[in-house]
Structures are given as C-alpha cells and as structure tokens.
Image: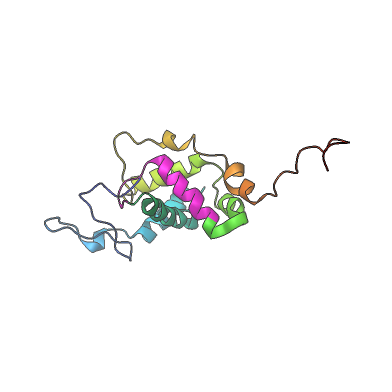
C-alpha cells in the first residue's frame, strides 16, 4: 500500500506531502501524518499511535526491499513488516505487536485501511482489506526464529557411535 500512485510525490521528512504545482492545497488544511495518527488512535482505540508509526517505518522498509518508492502489495508489505519487526524488536517482536493490539496480519490490514481513509496511504482498485488475512502465522514469523533447534532424531541402541 503506497502513496497515491505516481501523481503524488513522497512525503517530506516532516510527514507533510509536497504541494504539486497547480494544485490548490494549503499546508494549514493538510494533516501531518502524526496528527492523522492521533486522530486514528482516538477513533479506533484498538491500535495506539505507535502501531501506525511502526507501520509507516515498515512500509519504507518494504519499499526498499522491493526497490520501488510507490505501491507495494499486501503480501510485500507484510514481508516488510515481518522483517522490520524482527530487526527492531528481535525475540520481543510478537510481544511488542501484541501490546499494540496487533495479533494477526488482519490487524495490519485494519491499520493500513485506517490510514487510507485518512488520506495518508492509497490503494489500487484491486486492493482490499482481505488481502492481509492470509498473511503469516505470528508464532512462525516472530517466535520460531529464536527457538532452539529441535533435538536430533532418536538414538537407536547399538547404532553408530
């Protein structure tokens, strides 16, 4: 889920989109990303502001992985989220996400579509929230990489030494 296609530029460091020549948009009328996040966190209390801020970082990570600044698919974004969470939080990733109300990939879909409704992400006509549901298993994604390897197979008496 990227910015609004090629017609809109990437946001500036302050989170405000650039105003394109010929467009009549006033900075005073535009919400910064942070303001939108505060609005969303107040309206949809399932997810705190930190969840949205993490999602924005993970989106940048996904765009870098796929070497393009614009739209990424739900599956590409989820892979970026997984890798970013593991890099940022290591074995605590699942716990941190859980603290933010994120328990499945469907929660990431809710966050993305909340940001779409606020005008801070865009979607293509074929994108839908259900694209996030298959996702990945949180145990396999965030805990399994840190578990010790399984013990070797059973040792048979009289076998090779």
Relative vertical location of residue 135 with respect to residue 82 in this rendering, above or below = above
Residue drawn 38% across the image and 55% down it: 60
Task: Name the dominant secondary structure of the magenta segment.
Answer: helix
Camera-side residue: 150 or 20? Answer: 150
Residue 69 among magenta residues: yes
> Residue 153: percent from the left, percent from the top?
76, 38
Residue drawn 29% across the image and 59% down it: 11
Q: Tell me where the magenta segment starts and ends, as one range.
A: 68-86
> In the picture, which quadrant includes the N terminus?
top left
Residue lying farthest bottom? 14
> In the picture, which quadrant includes the C terminus?
top right
Number of marks in the image? 0
Camera-side residue: 43 or 110? Answer: 110
> Residue 15: percent from the left, percent from the top?
33, 62
> Residue 38: percent from the left, percent from the top?
42, 57
Residue drawn 62% across the image and 55% down it: 91
> Residue 33: percent from the left, percent from the top?
36, 58
Left or right, 82 with respect to 57, comes to: right
Residue drawn 15% across the image and 56% down it: 24
- Rendering quarter of residue 73: top left
């Amino acid at each position: 889920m990227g910015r609004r296609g090629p017609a809109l530029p990437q946001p500036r460091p302050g989170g405000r989109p650039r105003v394109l020549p010929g467009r009549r948009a006033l900075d005073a009328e535009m919400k910064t990303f942070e303001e939108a996040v505060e609005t969303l966190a107040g309206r949809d209390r399932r997810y705190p502001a930190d969840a949205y801020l993490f999602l924005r970082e993970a989106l940048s990570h996904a765009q870098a992985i796929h070497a393009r600044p614009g739209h990424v698919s739900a599956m590409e974004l989820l892979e970026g989220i997984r890798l970013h969470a593991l890099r940022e939080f290591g074995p605590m990733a699942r716990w941190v996400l859980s603290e933010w109300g994120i328990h499945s990939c469907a929660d990431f879909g809710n966050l993305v579509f909340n940001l779409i409704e606020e005008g801070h992400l865009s979607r293509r006509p074929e994108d839908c929230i259900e694209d996030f549901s298959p996702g990945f298993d949180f145990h396999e994604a965030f805990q399994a990489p840190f578990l010790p390897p399984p013990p070797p197979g059973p040792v048979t008496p009289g076998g090779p030494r």
